[in-house]
Amino acid sequence: MIEVENLRKQYGGFTAVEGSSFSVPEGEVFGVVGPNGAGKTTTLKMLAGLIEPTSGSARVAGYDAQDPEMRAHLGFLPEESPLYEDMTALSYLRFFADLYDVPRKTADERIHDTLDRLDLDHRERPIGDMSKGMTRKVAIARSLVNDPDVLVYDEPASGLDPLTTNYIIEFTRDLAESGKTVLFSAHNLFHVESICDRVAVMNDGRIVARGSVEDIREEHGRTEYRVYTTVEVEGSEPVTPDGAAAGVGENGRYRRTVESMDAVEETRELAARAGGEVEDIQTHTPSLEDIFLDIAEGSPDVEGRP
């Protein structure tokens, strides 16, 4: 598991991370999201033992993040991960298995099993001749050669095509279901929302929202009701049949957007008085991206549930 308490990193007069606290239990996928410069990568590097925190504490798999013994229990994937291009995937992964003192038979079984799961067939091809998606899969396999308890992934699917991206995201979910603790950062908030058990939103070095996506949506989001009527009522707008706003209504279809069921009922009454009726009601729930953009644009710092 991962335990972070009041983690802080300062470079001279600049504070990159300020007072971060969260925990990630075994078998959970925890996402860290935020705009560029929010402190995400700095946080992940402190957890990986690559950067020493200015203050606070970070424990990974029961070890202090600065303890060299911790690294035997960690799989770390940085956003930029250059590989040895003259080596084949197999020779490269065997080399890293040797660094972790993994017996050759165990290493080969683990390497081939991981590459099978990642659907990587060209294992004897030089890495320099591989596509970006293939090299990313090799990098992910490298993070697993020591069978770590905790995985810290920084943008695991960065710059990949949609098919490869979906494959890697699903694989990340599978790792958590196998019992591993997974913490990762990603810009694609749709994927974060689809696989994460909980999320921390960072902005200006601080965690400004934290919890399950539903918790964050409940606290920071706003549910809207789109009420479609056959007549124009106060606050409505004409729409085309597919729901997009238009200059004139087609077939007398209008849309009024409200934020409560009381306002929905009010719309029904207004339509009835005008000789029409409510034709459809659609609930619009904000996505994590909607909430993230709202928070990043200046919402007050609010800590969510732990």
Image (spheres, helix red, strand yellow):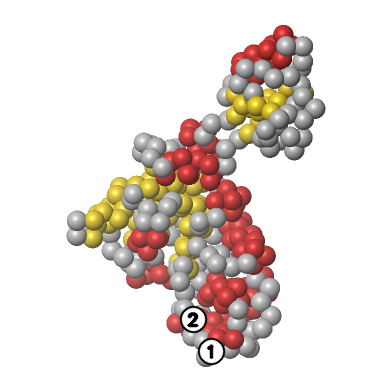
**Looking at the image, which residue sits at the far top?**
273
At horizontal 67% and vertical 33% (from top left) the residue drawn is 247
Above or below for 172 versus 197: below
Which residue type carries mark 1? Met
**Secondary structure at numbered mark 1:** loop
The image quarter containing residue 119 is bottom right
Above or below for 261 versus 242: above
Nearer-the-camera pick, 215 or 146? 215
The image quarter containing residue 41 is bottom left
Is residue 250 toward the left or the right of residue 179 in the image? right
Which residue type carries mark 2? Leu
At horizontal 54% and vertical 31% (from top left) the residue drawn is 222
**Secondary structure at numbered mark 2:** loop
Q: Which residue is identified by label 2?
A: 83
- Please rate how many residues cluster around mark 2, counting C-alpha atoms within 10 Å: few if below 14, some from 14 to 19, many from 20: some
**Looking at the image, which residue sits at the far right?**
251
At horizontal 59% and vertical 86% (from top left) the residue drawn is 129
At horizontal 54% and vertical 59% (from top left) the residue drawn is 180
Quick check: can you spot residue 132? yes
**Looking at the image, which residue sits at the far front?**
247
Q: Which residue is identified by label 1?
A: 87
Q: Where is residue 205 in the image (x, y as percent from the top left)?
A: 33, 51
| Mark 1 vs 2: CB contact within 8 A | yes
- Picture quarter with the C terminus: top left
Gap between marks 1 and 2 measured at Cα: 9 Å
